[in-house]
């Protein structure tokens, strides 16, 4: 199955540099604070233009460089401009470099983020390892439509949250081509949806990556993956880079096979400090996401599924043009133009509320008896006539819901950076503007079918038309247009050599237009605007210790999906069908954070540490609310204020022999207002639970503990491992906190590598070493909807539906560099 399924090539190596002595790809040692070396500059006696050059290789433990400063971008530019010194950033800093991504041997960047970023965790709510939910400080970036999003994700300065629902399709990101991943907090410059922060991915190019590499790995559950990348600086001005990746995985659960195929390329040109890049990418992925499964089925078989098919097809193509011009020694201008096309097809097998009519079993009806009329609503076909029942007596009915989302996004941005002194003090001023417009066509249909004893839904070819009261699951055809505009400015002023103050803000304006293609029910035109400020400061207590504090605000406007399903009197199948579009209020997050960080050179290597605290309060938070008695139906609504606060701490030691990192994060996430919502919780009364101020927000663990280590036993042999502990969490749907929590879990992984020759490395890893059977997420389901075929067709008694984690897995591979 291997070669035919695969055609892969890419690599999971890390921040890769070159030397004048050779062109072979090689790993870059990271600095003590684990920051991406976005730009390294040497202070000059007087300002003058300089030509961008490759950063020098920093050998940990050899003494802190005296003439170089690590900097990173603090706004969504191209990443090639002038960044800000780390000691002047008034917020927490979390970064992952390509070496760390390589150690995970995973084609999913979210795995490296979870391992190395305090306060960040992932779960597989979809049941697919390539479609994780990424949670940071209680905010989510998820591929699952209907999940309220709270993190913005950028790739080379371009926001890649999808236009229709702000989802993030992690499977489309070319992991092998990532140079650094930065998790940003306390910065409204990153625009819409950065309530909890932003994830900024900077990609490789031919100027910062030289050589070639092929990486091939295989192992448990039919996993075979490969990657290849190549970069070359053609001459002093031109450079090219390309990366190709492919993965096939059978999955450990029934009906869970996936294929991932991605390409990324970059052509760069630079002269006298000016730099331009044209980069492009395509992906074509087929993913099976068996989602959560009733606990009683998992007790029989850990690979069980519930209602199949559950598949997603993601396709993307994008083209980005970025440029940087050093107009004067103190003025730098950056610009980006991007075009992105995205298509997603989902096939989702579900139970159905369609059933033979009580009054006449030869016809089909929808839903329960209306208490006012004493009648059932007819289930109509596409022609508007009531459907005749074609199914055998006793058949268990289901439906296959299909959706297609096609989006085209175009955007431009510009940014100027000035480093002139202000009142005789060092100063850095950034001003920028962005404009993005997206057009989306969304369609949905529902095909009736029957459900077998393996929970597979077999279609009948009969499609539902508009029917049901108050619900409707007939076909949907909707066109939406999003227009997002932003203007931001940031200024960092050095009061003295130790004290720096940053202030600024961003104005966001958004317009979301919905145009129903089958009628008028979904038509709507919604506008939102807001100014979000930021202010903060840093103080260098000693040469090795810095204190920081900051305050910022951010906003998220409702997505077309949320606006199209916001009427509690007419709920819809969330993520599948849309009903009406009452206006929702935008979400506003206000965050304050403070902490300390430091570095020190020890005999065993470079020590880095940080500790900080934060509090983020959301006003008008949006939740997906279930409709009582209607399985799968719901709507979006503003539920008042919520609060997320916590503490994060991290320590690391890095040398040529030892790489060690450990972190702890505490999160307290609560509702601040009372409200009622629908739920399948066994404590629901009439399908309703009462949420009180102080109740914990579900699915967010309070404690995360992480540790990773890699030790060079010899010059050519390395061994290492990592551990993750995630504390208990409330079930999704248990917003009233009455049901016992989903248990905590701990997972341990091991890895090793051996450098056979200068150009050949072999490696292996074991994930979930102790074969711990745990679940990363839990929710409730309607126990009466389908029988428990694993128990002779009896009714389910356990209301829990769980997302099982992957059992112990073994992998081995080899990496060849040229």
Image (cartoon, rainbow, N blue to C red):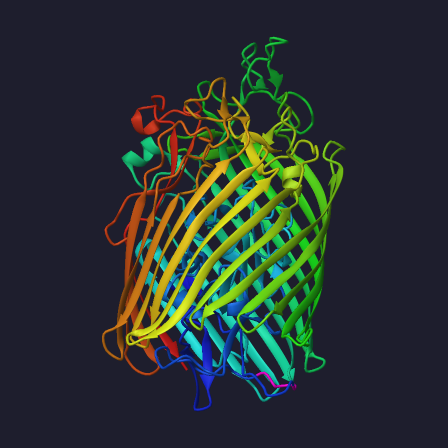
Q: Is residue 50 magenta?
A: yes
Residue 461 placement: quadrant: top right
Q: Is residue 273 visible?
A: yes
Residue 696 placement: quadrant: top left
Q: Position of residue 812 (x, y in %)?
A: 30, 65
Q: Relative to 402, is 437 on the left or the right? A: right
Q: Residue at x 66, y 27 (%)?
A: 466
Using the image as rendered, state which of residue 94 and residue 250 is in the foreground: 94
Q: Relative to 603, is 312 on the left or the right? A: right
Residue 703, relative to residue 686: is it above or below? below
Quadrant including the N terminus: bottom left
Quadrant including the C terminus: bottom left
- Total numbered labels placed on residues in the image: 0
Secondary structure of the magenta portion, mostly? loop
Q: Position of residue 653 (x, y in %)?
A: 33, 69
Residue 474 placement: quadrant: top right
Q: Is residue 302 magenta?
A: no
Using the image as rendered, state which of residue 422 and residue 297 is in the foreground: 422
Q: Position of residue 111 (x, y in %)?
A: 41, 57
Residue 613, relative to residue 719: is it above or below? above
Q: Position of residue 276 (x, y in %)?
A: 65, 77
Considering every residue shown, the one lying at the far bottom of the view is 21
Q: Relative to 664, is 413 on the left or the right? A: right
Using the image as rendered, state which of residue 457 and residue 515 is in the foreground: 515
Q: Residue at x 60, y 13 (%)?
A: 370
Q: Is residue 8 visible?
A: no
Using the image as rendered, state which of residue 516 and residue 652 is in the foreground: 652
**Numbered range of the magenta stretch:** 48-52
């Amino acid at each position: 199955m291997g070669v035919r399924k695969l055609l892969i090539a890419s690599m999971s190596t890390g921040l890769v540099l070159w030397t004048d002595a050779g062109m072979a790809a090689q790993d870059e040692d990271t600095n003590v604070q684990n920051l991406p070396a976005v730009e390294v500059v040497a202070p000059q006696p007087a300002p003058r233009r300089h030509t961008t050059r490759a950063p020098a290789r920093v050998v940990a433990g050899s003494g802190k460089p005296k003439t170089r400063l690590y900097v990173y971008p603090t706004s969504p530019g191209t990443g090639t401009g002038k960044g800000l010194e780390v000691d002047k950033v008034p917020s927490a800093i979390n970064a992952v470099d390509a070496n760390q991504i390589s150690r995970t041997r995973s084609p999913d960047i979210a795995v490296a983020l979870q391992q190395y970023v305090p306060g960040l965790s992932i779960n597989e709510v979809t049941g697919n390892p390539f479609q994780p939910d990424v949670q940071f400080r209680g905010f989510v970036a998820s591929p699952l439509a209907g999940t309220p999003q709270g993190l913005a994700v950028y790739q080379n300065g371009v926001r890649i949250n999808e236009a229709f629902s702000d989802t993030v399709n992690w499977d489309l990101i070319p992991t092998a081509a990532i140079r650094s991943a930065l998790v940003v907090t306390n910065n409204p410059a990153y625009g819409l949806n950065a309530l909890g922060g932003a994830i900024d991915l900077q990609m490789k190019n031919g100027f910062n990556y030289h050589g070639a590499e092929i990486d091939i790995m295989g192992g448990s559950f039919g996993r075979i993956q490969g990657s290849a990348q190549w970069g070359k600086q053609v001459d002093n001005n031109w450079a090219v880079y390309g990366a190709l990746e492919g993965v096939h995985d059978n999955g450990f659960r029934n009906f869970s096979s996936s294929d991932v195929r991605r390409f990324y390329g970059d052509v760069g040109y630079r002269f006298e400090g000016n730099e331009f890049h044209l980069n492009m990418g395509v992906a074509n992925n087929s993913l099976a996401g068996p989602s959560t499964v009733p606990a009683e089925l998992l007790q029989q078989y850990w690979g069980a599924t519930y209602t199949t098919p559950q598949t997603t097809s993601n396709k993307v193509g994008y083209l980005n043009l970025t440029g940087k011009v050093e107009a004067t020694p103190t003025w730098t201008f950056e610009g980006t133009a991007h075009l992105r096309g995205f298509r997603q097809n989902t096939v989702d097998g579900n139970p159905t509320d369609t059933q033979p009519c009580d009054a006449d079993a030869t016809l089909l009806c929808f839903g329960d008896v209306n208490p006012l009329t004493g009648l059932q609503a007819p289930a109509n076909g596409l022609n508007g006539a009531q459907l005749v029942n074609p199914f055998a007596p006793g058949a268990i009915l289901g439906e296959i819901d299909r959706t297609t989302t096609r989006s085209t996004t175009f955007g431009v941005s510009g940014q100027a950076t000035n480093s002139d002194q202000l009142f005789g003090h060092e100063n850095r001023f950034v001003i920028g503007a962005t404009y993005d417009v997206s057009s989306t066509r969304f369609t949905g249909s529902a095909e009736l079918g029957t459900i077998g004893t393996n929970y597979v839904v077999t279609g009948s070819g009969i499609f539902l038309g508009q029917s049901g009261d108050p619900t409707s699951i007939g076909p949907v055809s909707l066109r939406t247009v999003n227009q997002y505009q932003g203007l931001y400015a940031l200024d960092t002023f050095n009061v003295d050599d130790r004290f720096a103050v940053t202030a600024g803000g961003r104005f966001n304006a958004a317009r979301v237009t919905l145009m129903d293609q089958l009628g008028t029910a979904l038509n709507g035109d919604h506008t939102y605007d807001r100014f979000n400020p930021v202010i903060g400061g840093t103080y260098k207590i000693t040469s090795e210790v810095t204190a920081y504090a900051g305050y910022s605000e951010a906003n998220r406007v409702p997505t077309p999906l949320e606006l199209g399903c916001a009427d509690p009197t007419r709920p819809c199948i969330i993520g599948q069908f849309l009903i009406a579009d009452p206006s929702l209020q935008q979400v506003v997050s206000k965050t304050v954070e403070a902490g300390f960080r430091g570095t020190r050179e020890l005999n065993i290597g470079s020590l880095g540490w940080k500790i900080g605290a934060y509090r983020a309060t959301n006003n008008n938070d949006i939740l997906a609310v279930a409709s009582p008695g209607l399985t799968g139906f719901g709507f979006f609504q503003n539920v008042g204020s919520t609060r997320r606060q916590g503490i994060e701490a991290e320590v690391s030691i890095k040398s040529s022999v030892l790489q060690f990192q450990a972190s702890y994060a505490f999160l307290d996430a609560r509702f601040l207002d009372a409200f009622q919502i629908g739920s399948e919780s066994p404590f629901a009364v009439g399908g309703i639970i009462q949420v009180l101020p102080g109740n914990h927000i579900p699915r967010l663990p309070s404690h995360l503990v992480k540790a990773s280590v890699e030790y060079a036993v010899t010059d050519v042999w390395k061994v290492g491992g990592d551990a993750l502990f995630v504390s208990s969490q409330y079930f999704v749907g248990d917003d009233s906190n009455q049901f016992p929590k989903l248990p905590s879990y701990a997972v341990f992984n091991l890895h090793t590598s051996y450098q056979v020759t200068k150009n050949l490395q072999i490696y292996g890893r074991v994930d979930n070493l102790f074969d711990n059977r745990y679940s990363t997420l839990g929710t409730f389901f309607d126990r009466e909807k389908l029988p428990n075929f694993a128990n002779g067709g009896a009714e389910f008694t356990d209301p829990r539906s769980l997302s099982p984690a992957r059992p112990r897995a073994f992998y081995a591979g080899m990496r060849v560099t040229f």
